[in-house]
Amino acid sequence: MYNDYKQRIISFYKKHKRMPGYNEIMALTGFKSKNAVYKLIEKLVDEGVVSKDRSGHMIPQRLSGGVSLLGLVEAGFPSPAEEELLDVIDFDEYLTPNKESSYILMVKGDSMIDAGILPGDMVVVERKQTYKPGQIVIANIDNEYTMKYLRKKGDAYYLEPANPRYKPIYPKESFRIEAVVTSVVRKY
């Protein structure tokens, strides 16, 4: 029965793009008490399906079972194919291990093409406490947002595109790093 309840909660999340509240879980499961809902949520937390924020609200974590990683494929010279189950990967967990500080942005423009980031791609970004030169960052420079390499010359930071058609950007008034790019997602 537990797996059925878990699937109902996951389906609710996928449909409504939010986790259900106690009363909604009672309706989904047929439970008559909030204590039963509490115990179900604790079991979901123990299993790593959800976590709780400071106010006790559920945060989705591992809602899907993942996709099988079957082996390696040669990108150079052809080699004999070998299929072997190496692992199961949950892309949600793989791309956003720190969900509370991560978000996704759609890429517009071609200033990062030499870094392999193309228009229409999605980038997963994470807010962090510190940033290092060489990272691809989302920055607010002179009240405009952009994605570029973070660079440092002396004590001054600036942004460098990954396309020779564009020039580095030096802040005139304000400069703030918002997040660092952790991965790129592209669908064909």
Image (cartoon, rainbow, N blue to C red):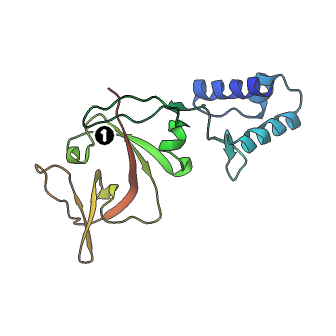
Q: Position of residue 57 (x, y in %)?
A: 70, 44
Q: Position of residue 50 (x, y in %)?
A: 67, 41
Number of dots carrying numbers: 1
Point out the residue furthest to the front here. 80
Q: Nearer the viewer, residue 171 or 15?
A: 15
Q: Residue at x 31, y 64 (%)?
A: 175
Is 95 placed left or right of 56 in the picture? left
Q: Residue at x 36, y 66 (%)?
A: 132
Relative to 103, say whether 25 is above or below.
above
* Residue 124 showing in the rendered view: yes
Q: Position of residue 4 (x, y in %)?
A: 75, 23
Per the image, the residue denoted by label 1 is 107
Q: Nearer the viewer, residue 114 or 13?
A: 114
Relative to 152, say whether 179 is above or below.
above
Q: Quadrant of the N terminus?
A: top right
SS for callout 1: loop
Give the residue type at disc 1: Val
Q: Position of residue 186 (x, y in %)?
A: 34, 33
Point out the residue furthest to the bottom here. 154
Is 137 placed left or right of 2 in the picture? left
Q: Quadrant of the C terminus?
A: top left
Dot 1: few (<14), some (14–19), or many (≥20) neighbours within 10 Å?
A: some
Q: Nearer the viewer, residue 104 or 75?
A: 75
* Residue 89 showing in the rendered view: no
